[in-house]
Amino acid sequence: MKTVKKVIFLSIVLALLMMLVSCIKPPIGNGENNNGNGDDVDNTQSDETPQGNINDNDNVDKASWDADKVYDLDKPKATIETYASTEDATVYSFKNMKNEDALDYIEYLKDEGYTYNSVTLKDYTYGASNEEGVHVAFYYDAETGYGTITISKGDAPDPSDDGGAVIGGDNEWDSSKVAGIPDPGSEILSFWNTDKSVQYTFEPLEDYTDFVNKIKAAGFTINPTEAVISGSFMYVASNSKGDVVTFTAAEDEWVLGVVFAE
C-alpha cells in the first residue's frame, strides 16, 4: 500500500516535470533517445509545421492519443502537445483545456475506477489507482490551460484502504518531515503528506539561491538537475538514502516536496 501511494505521488511529480520540460525549446539533453538511465523512450512530436496564421491558441494536435498506452482512457478535451513513453509509464502534455473540462475529466477518472489511494492537490490535480493497479496522475494549470496526464502500472491497492493524502494542518516548518532541510524562514501557505511523501508550499523570499544551498547542505546533491523554465527555477536531486527532493521557486510561491525511499 505504501508503494502504491509513493508511485502515485511520483507520477504527479513526473507530470509536473513533464509539463515544465515540454516548455523548453530546444529540449535539454544530448539528443539521445533515452531518459538518462538507459531506458528507451518513445518521445513523439509532430514533424509537420502547421501552415498559415497559427499562434499559441491553435488546436492542432502535435501528438496522437494512443489508447493502448493509457489503458483505454478517453482523450481529454484539449490539444495534445507532447508524448513520451517508457516501459513503465506514459506521459501526455496538453494545452487549450477549459476549467470545466478539467473538472469533468477528474470526475471521469473517478467514474472509471481511479479512486484508490487518491491524492488531490487544489482543484485540478488528481492522482489515484484503480483496482488493477494502474496509476493515473492528472495535472492542469487553470491560468495557462496547460496540463499533463501520466499513466503507469504498479501493484494493486488494498481494497480496504481509502488511502487519501493528508492535506493542510501544519503551519510551521518541521525539518524532521523533510529529511533535515531547514526552515526557509517564510510563511507556510499549505502542507500535505502521504506515508512516503511530503510537500510544503510557502511564500517566496528575495533569492532562492540561499535556500537551494540549504537543500544541498542537507545532503541532496546526487544526480542534481537545475533549470529555469518560464520564469520559475527548479532543483531536483536525491540524497544517499535515495530520498528525492523537488524544489520549485515561482514568482508567487515556492514549493518543496520530498519523496522518501523505501
Image (tube, rainbow, N blue to C red):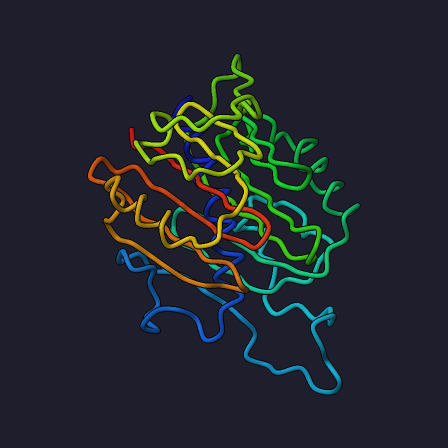
Please tell me which residue is depicted at 49% across the width and 74% down the height of the picture: 25
Please tell me which residue is depicted at 63% across the width and 59% down the height of the picture: 94
Q: Give the residue at the far left of this rendering.
A: 240
In the image, 159: left or right of 260?
right
Above/below status of 254 relative to 18: above
In the image, 243: left or right of 107?
left
Residue 15 is situated, as x and y percent measured from the top left of the image, at 51, 49
The quadrant of the image that shows the C terminus is: top left
Of the pair 50 and 56, the residue shown nearer to us: 56
In the image, 66: left or right of 111?
left
Above/below status of 217 relative to 194: below
The quadrant of the image that shows the N terminus is: top left
Above/below status of 158 relative to 59: above
Residue 221 is situated, as x and y percent measured from the top left of the image, at 24, 49
Q: Dividing the picture into quarters, in which one does residue 155 lie?
A: top left
Q: Give the residue at the far bottom of this rendering.
A: 52
Residue 20 is situated, as x and y percent measured from the top left of the image, at 51, 59
Q: Dividing the picture into quarters, in which one does residue 182 lie?
A: top left
Of the pair 243 and 253, the residue shown nearer to us: 253
Please tell me which residue is depicted at 53% across the width and 33% down the height of the picture: 188
Residue 229 is situated, as x and y percent measured from the top left of the image, at 49, 63
Q: Dividing the picture into quarters, in which one does residue 77 lie?
A: bottom right
